[in-house]
Image (cartoon, helix red, strand yellow):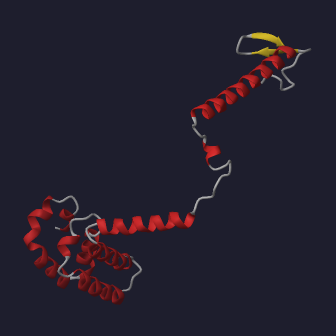
Amino acid sequence: MIGSGDDYNDGWAYNKKVDSYESNDEIRKFQKWKKDEQKNAAQAKRFEDESTGVKRKAEDDGGKHHKKDWKAIKAEAKLKKEKRKEWKGGSEAYMLGVRSKKIWEELRQSNCKKERKSELCKELWNLVKGKVKSLIFSHDTVRVIETLMAVGGEQYRTELFEEMKNDILEMSKNKYSRFLF
């Protein structure tokens, strides 16, 4: 680096860009010239902005920077989240998926006791009974039904089959529900 002290050699410095030695005076003159150029460019920009009436960002708010209003940002995010819930097939279907996945999360764990698993299967079946068709065609809720079939026993398998038997052809073509067979 030019001017760092270790590059100096009796008042001369090696300039890598032009592959030659320059005196310290030449380097100082160049640095002063460069600063003056930048200063003149900034002044010209200011003059140009004033003459055209264009305000720069720092002049818009009097040169002060305002903090972000986090309460407003959080409120806006909350509204977006609620709209997203409604968009996902209605809030009732969304809430059904959320509740069934909470039960499924506990049901699928290996350290869950048999009595608790049977309670959870019964609770899950009461929740999804009559609404299985809306659950078997999405990637996250079909796993809930798969677990109910695997853990629930023969009773739940037959009831699930009775509810899904009219949609077997459609299920076999679907990306997610074809694994229920």
| Residue visible at 72% across and 22% down in the picture | 37
| Residue visible at 23% across and 76% down in the picture | 149
**Which residue occupies the extreme right position in the image?**
10
170 and 27: which is toward the camera: 27
Give the percent coordinates (x, y) of residue 156: 19, 82
128 and 88: which is toward the camera: 88
Quadrant of the frame with the C terminus: bottom left
| Residue visible at 63% across and 34% down in the picture | 50
Give the percent coordinates (x, y) of residue 153: 22, 82
Residue 135 falls in which quadrant of the image? Answer: bottom left
In the rendered image, the vertical position of residue 56 relative to residue 145, given as above or below: above
In the rendered image, the vertical position of residue 54 relative to residue 157, given as above or below: above
Residue 157 falls in which quadrant of the image? Answer: bottom left
Q: How many marks?
A: 0
| Residue visible at 61% across and 47% down in the picture | 60
Give the percent coordinates (x, y) of residue 180: 19, 68
122 and 10: which is toward the camera: 10
In the rendered image, the vertical position of residue 79 relative to residue 63, given as above or below: below
Residue 102 shown left or right of residue 130 in the figure: right
